[in-house]
Image (tube, grey):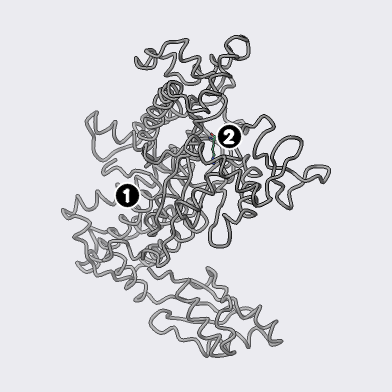
Amino acid sequence: MPDPQLVLAARVQDALSAAFGPSYADADPVIRPSQFADLQANVALPLAKKLGRKPREVADEIVKNLDVTGVVSDVQVSGPGFINLTLSDVWIAGEAQRALEDERLGVPATGHPQKVVVEYSSPNVAKEMHVGHLRTTIVGDAIARILDFLGHDVVRDNHVGDWGTPFGMLIEHLLDLGEDAAARGDSSVRDLTAFYQAARQKFDGDEGFADRSRRRVVALQAGDAETLRLWNVLVDVSKNYFNSVYGRLGVTLTDDDIKGESFYNDLLAPTVQELEDKGIAVVSDGALCAFPPGFTGREGEPLPVIIRKSDGGYNYSTTDLATIRYRVDTEHVDRMIYVVGAPQALHFQMVFAVARMAGWLNDDVRAEHAQIGNVLGTDGKILRTRAGGTVKLAELIDEGIERAGAAYDEVQHDESFDAATRAAIVQDVGIGAIKYADLSVARDSEYVFDFDRMISFNGKTGPYLQYAAARIRSIFRKGGLTPDEATGPIRLTDPAERALALQLLGFGAALEQAGETAEPHKLATYVYSVADAYTTFHENCPVLKAPDEETKASRLALCAATLRTLTTGLALLGVPTPERM
Ligand code: ARG
């Protein structure tokens, strides 16, 4: 779909090279939204400086060479040298029509598909998922869906924490409770927080237990079959639990996407060996360390990435380095996106720096930390339970759906639904509210978790967007046709029709930017602006009662294109859109 901004950028660049020579063909035409027209090109100002001429003169010269026939209906030079560009109604209508007729809404699949690992969710085995994992899960899933849609080869990767020293005590605790407790789904095992805490308490207070646990870690690392079997029992209990959360949230992760820390266990030694061979890893204070350039501590001393501890054990960084090496050597990926909390920023910067020293990362293979900000309570501090504990994700979802039910019952509905239909709608509203609230803020900024705000049917919320889609569907039901049967042609007469159609043309650019920067909020913001333009259209332009058949056909087509843009955009955010509300 031709984003008007890109179309005009190319035309202005042609004019620049015609007016000032081919060396200006790549100059940034500085196309921006305009108060006085649809867009304005501001390139004359910086260019005038460079040429030592008056900006207004430069602008006139660009306009003289500008060929925008068929695209722009009016060109005006204003102020010091802004070029105001008003798009032609016929052009907008034609492009909206093309989008309507295309199953991808005019968004082409990329001509340069990349293999992209999106590493997200990554909870820890034998621990409850908490509210921090809400964001790494939802944001990561949206990034994966968007890149998929854009035509990339996406590898979903759930890097669960399933290895390391705690598993000694967890296995011993499981043995104390009796394995059958796990098989029965006994709450002592199923309640992961309680299970973990009980194990921890015994480890801290009972020397004998701590001893057994340490021996168990050694057996685990050595690949002892019985120990691995017990470890698997724990992993399975957690996987079931993760899957239940993913299922409720509508997250696309499956067991096949799990490549936990344990997966890289056998690759740790060869990874470390390669770092030693390349002279990157050196012994310092008994530990094997790498010192990536540019990282220093408070006193200016070089900061180490510890690769092998003095006791011979590997740690978190070692696993992440082995992971990068595996993805490059075996999976041949072009891009890795780590959707992980912002507190781990330094860790990733340093790990990436070491991977660059080793040659695993370079200009052709990118790794990026898609940082996730904290979720705050209404008191502005990290979200906690009233008792001060971490908020369990499963309980948060329960509460969201319950509150969505109450909010839903308070608003007027055109139709009444049976209990099962209502429950399904409420489920979608609750989940949609939580997910959209999370996705509509920049992923690296903090936000206040406030059910009242996110579940509202007004404002920049999931339920508002879901409602906009349902409202369009109901027009088609009342009109006795399906959205697919609305084929136009689209003609634009009312300003609200024009504004809506213009908004629809921005879908491809919004997706492109969201995928490029791994920032789903750019898509979330776009979808909202479509719904907003639709609301104005809805208030000003009767559809089924349009003044004549041609207008009615055009408006139905605009409704159909809007509906598909909304549902596709929301689906790429993982937000469900109920048929009726
Ligand atoms: N399991 C970790 C946690 O819950 C996140 C893992 C992040 N990914 C990584 N490659 N280090 O905090």
Image quarter where the N terminus lies is: bottom left
Helix, strand or loop under label 2: strand
Q: Are marks 2 and 1 in contact (CB under 8 Å)?
A: no
- Is the residue 495 above or below the residue 545 in the image? below
Where is residue 58 shown, x and y percent of the image? 62, 86
Mark 2 or mark 1: name the one nearer the start of the chain.
2
Q: In this orientation, which residue lies closer to the viewer: 499 or 105?
A: 105
Q: Local crowd at mark 2 within 10 Å, few (<14), some, or many (≥20)?
A: some
Count of marks, rendered view? 2
Q: Ligand 1 is located in which of the four quadrants?
A: top right
- Identified at 49% across, 50% down, the residue is 327
Q: Amino acid at mark 1?
A: Ala
Q: In this orientation, which residue lies closer to the viewer: 91 or 220?
A: 220
Q: In this orientation, which residue lies closer to the viewer: 293 or 2?
A: 293
Q: Is residue 573 left or right of residue 210?
A: left
Where is residue 108 shown, x and y percent of the image? 36, 66
- Identified at 56% across, 21% down, the residue is 386
Q: Is residue 462 left or right of residue 18?
A: left
Which of the numbered marks, if any, corresponds to residue 376?
2
Rounded to the nearest whole Å, what is the CA distance between mark 2 and mark 1? Answer: 30 Å
Q: Local crowd at mark 1 within 10 Å, few (<14), some, or many (≥20)?
A: many
- Identify the residue under disc 1: 469
Where is residue 496 shown, x and y percent of the image? 38, 63
Q: Amino acid at mark 2?
A: Leu
The image quarter in which residue 320 lies:
top right
